[in-house]
Amino acid sequence: MRPDQTDRAADADRLHGRWMGIVALATLLVPALLVGELLVEGLPALSLGFLFDAPADAGRAGGIGSVLVSTLWVLAVCLGVALPLGLGCALFLVEQVRADSRLGRGLQLVLDILGGVPSIVFGLFGNRFFAVELGLGFSILSGGLTLACMVLPLFIRAAEQALRQCPLGYRRAAVALAVSRWGFVRRILLPVAGRGIALGIVLSSGRALAETAVLLFTAGYVTRWPESWLDSGRTLAVHIYDLAMNVSGGSTNAAATALVLLALAIGIQGLAAMLGRLSTGASQ
């Protein structure tokens, strides 16, 4: 290559690098502006009383104590059902079904289709099946079970991809050492796939925390303190929607609630990342 061509190529590379840097900064600017706006509007309303008191005056006053408890209960039901079922299904797909078989392709297609179903459809299904047919009514249990159905495809696909990343050499070594299949899964496969499974937990919990349509049809709308799994309850996302859309003068408390929801999502992400690191460390 001639010197002038080399110089032009170097200039093109530098220009490309600058453009990529600008795009990266613009991408980072979006969440920075989002968090900054929430902090400016919602931070004055944050206090211990806001976190522990129940809403008053349609959410304009009081806090989010009962809403926060309802959110945690709904999320506990959702993850308590989705994680064991999803991990079991992912293990079945990886250990018992060939990926290129007709059954494997069919199951993956069904999961992909379910993952693309709009949340409002899951809400209608949950209302009909859990609330009406099973007699659970508008309750935390109905909302959590419906959310579990919604996030199952997402978690199964994430866990499946993580499990398939296990090196083939590990399997051959386990066979050579006469390790049982359950022993291989428990001692090698799950720890190696820990980070990917943790990512699936983060994605699933994030989608569950952000959901409103499903919970309006299943968990209900009330702001009172829940006393059992069969009580109705309002989640943080539904509370934010109501304050922003239906309550005049509720924007400040809506922003403060959004900050709490964001902090909860970040906390779950940190906990899942820590568990993923611990499982990976245990496998080494």
Image (cartoon, rainbow, N blue to C red):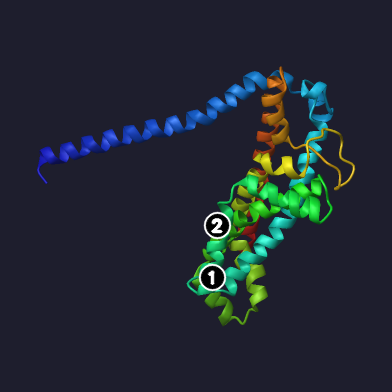
Q: Which residue is mark 1?
A: 104
Q: CA distance from mark 1 to mark 2?
A: 14 Å
Q: Is residue 206 left or right of residue 221?
A: left
Tell which residue pokes out farthest to the right in this image: 227
Tell me the element at label 1: helix
Q: Residue at x 67, y 26 (%)?
A: 245
User: Quick check: 183 above or below 82?
Assistant: below
The quarter of the image holding the C terminus is: bottom right
Q: Residue at x 73, y 20 (%)?
A: 45
Q: Is residue 222 left or right of residue 15?
A: right
Q: Nearer the viewer, residue 148 or 159?
A: 148
How many neighbours does mark 2 have within 10 angstroms: few (below 14), some (14-19), or many (20 or more)?
few
Image coords of residue 16 (percent x, y): 29, 36
Tell me the element at label 2: helix
Q: Is residue 39 visible?
A: yes
The amino acid type found where label 1 is placed reads: Gly
Q: Is residue 118 left or right of residue 148?
A: left
Q: Nearer the viewer, residue 176 or 137?
A: 137
Image coords of residue 191 (percent x, y): 62, 62
Give the mark nearest the N terminus, 1 or 2: 1
Q: Is residue 284 visible?
A: no
Q: Which residue is mark 2?
A: 113
- Identify the image quadrant of residue 10: top left
**Residue 132 tag number:** none
Q: Residue at x 69, y 20 (%)?
A: 252
User: Quick check: 158 above or below 233?
Assistant: below
Image coords of residue 257 (percent x, y): 71, 29
